[in-house]
Image (cartoon, rainbow, N blue to C red):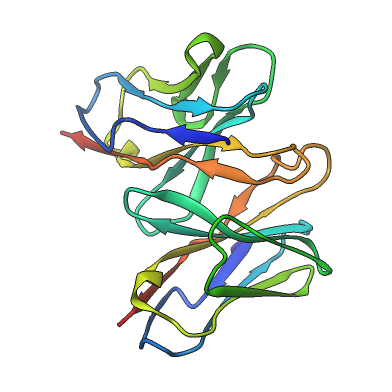
């Protein structure tokens, strides 16, 4: 069965520092992978997605993620964090055939940004 | 107006009461989903619907029911609410054109507390 693990429940970084949020997935075939961000009191917003092709994908707000099949990972990165990036981040994998549109989410990582 | 609207935003109800959470969308998407978010567990799929006549159970459907009144409306009901159904509930939509994972849009969520 497909699953997603985000090993870090909570991360604190200083503003301007680099960021990497980890995501590991379990899936037999080539996965559809996503990163979403949830600001307080808001719904989830798509940051970026990987379906195929170039393993380094660029997203909104200066985020990028790299798909590494050998490590079953899809880590999210940002070179310089801004205070407005404080939020909860979710990694997700498409479940079953792409026709269903079902997503399986990780547990989430809460990002705190220190001034 | 938001593309995906959930009502109410917040609700406190008593154990044993019936409650309905409503979701409406203006995206024109045919697929709609109900997810539940709990701290440390991420989002879990309750029910999903491909169209008015096609409704499917997700991974945690026990204790819940749904109704797809129209393409744009998808309601989630708790027939007899219990305290462990206290959670943040999200409605989401997606487009069936091409891959079902394109165009996933979330509502802002309904925070439900069962006392």
The image quarter in which residue B57 lies: bottom right
Residues A47 and B53: in front is B53
Note whether A80 is above or below A96 in the view shown. Answer: above
Residue B70 position within the rendered picture, expressed as x and y whole percent measured from the top left: 79, 74
Note whether A6 is above or below A102 in the view shown. Answer: above
Residue B60 position within the rendered picture, expressed as x and y whole percent measured from the top left: 53, 60
The quarter of the image holding the N terminus of chain A is: top right
Number of numbered markers: 0
Left or right? Give the position of B106 relative to B95: left
Residue A99 position within the rendered picture, expressed as x and y whole percent measured from the top left: 78, 42
Left or right? Give the position of B33 relative to A80: right
The quarter of the image holding the C terminus of chain A is: top left
What residue is drawn where x is 25% and y is 22%? A16
The image quarter in which residue A51 lies: top right
What residue is drawn where x is 62% and y is 75%? B65
Left or right? Give the position of B103 relative to A67: right
Residue B1 seen in the figure: no
Note whether B80 is above or below A98 in the view shown. Answer: below
Left or right? Give the position of A114 relative to B16: left
What residue is drawn where x is 22% and y is 28%? A15
Note whether A43 is above or below A27 in the view shown. Answer: below
Residue B30 seen in the figure: yes
Residue that protrudes farthest toward the left in the picture: A115
Residue A38 position within the rendered picture, expressed as x and y whole percent measured from the top left: 42, 47
Residues B89 and B102: in front is B89
What residue is drawn where x is 70% and y is 45%? A101
């Amino acid at each position: 069965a497909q699953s997603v693990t985000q090993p870090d429940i909570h991360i604190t970084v200083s503003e301007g520092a680099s960021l990497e949020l980890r995501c590991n997935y379990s899936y037999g075939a080539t996965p559809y992978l996503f990163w979403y961000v949830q600001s307080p009191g808001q719904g989830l917003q798509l940051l970026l997605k990987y379906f195929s092709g170039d393993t380094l994908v660029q997203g909104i707000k200066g985020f990028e993620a790299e798909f590494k099949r050998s490590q079953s990972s899809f880590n999210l990165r940002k070179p310089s964090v801004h205070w407005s990036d404080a939020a909860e981040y979710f990694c997700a994998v498409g479940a079953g055939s792409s026709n269903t549109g079902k997503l399986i989410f990780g547990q989430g990582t809460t990002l705190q940004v220190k001034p | 107006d938001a593309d995906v609207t959930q009502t109410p935003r917040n609700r406190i109800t008593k154990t044993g009461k019936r409650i309905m959470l409503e979701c409406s969308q203006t995206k024109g998407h045919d697929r709609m989903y109900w997810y539940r978010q709990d701290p440390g567990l991420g989002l879990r799929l309750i029910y999903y619907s491909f169209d008015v006549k096609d409704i499917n159970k997700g991974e945690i459907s026990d204790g819940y029911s749904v109704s797809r009144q129209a393409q744009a409306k998808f309601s989630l009901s708790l027939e007899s609410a219990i305290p462990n159904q206290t959670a943040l509930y999200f409605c989401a939509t997606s487009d069936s054109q091409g891959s079902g994972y394109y165009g996933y849009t979330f509502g802002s969520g309904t925070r439900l507390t069962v006392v």
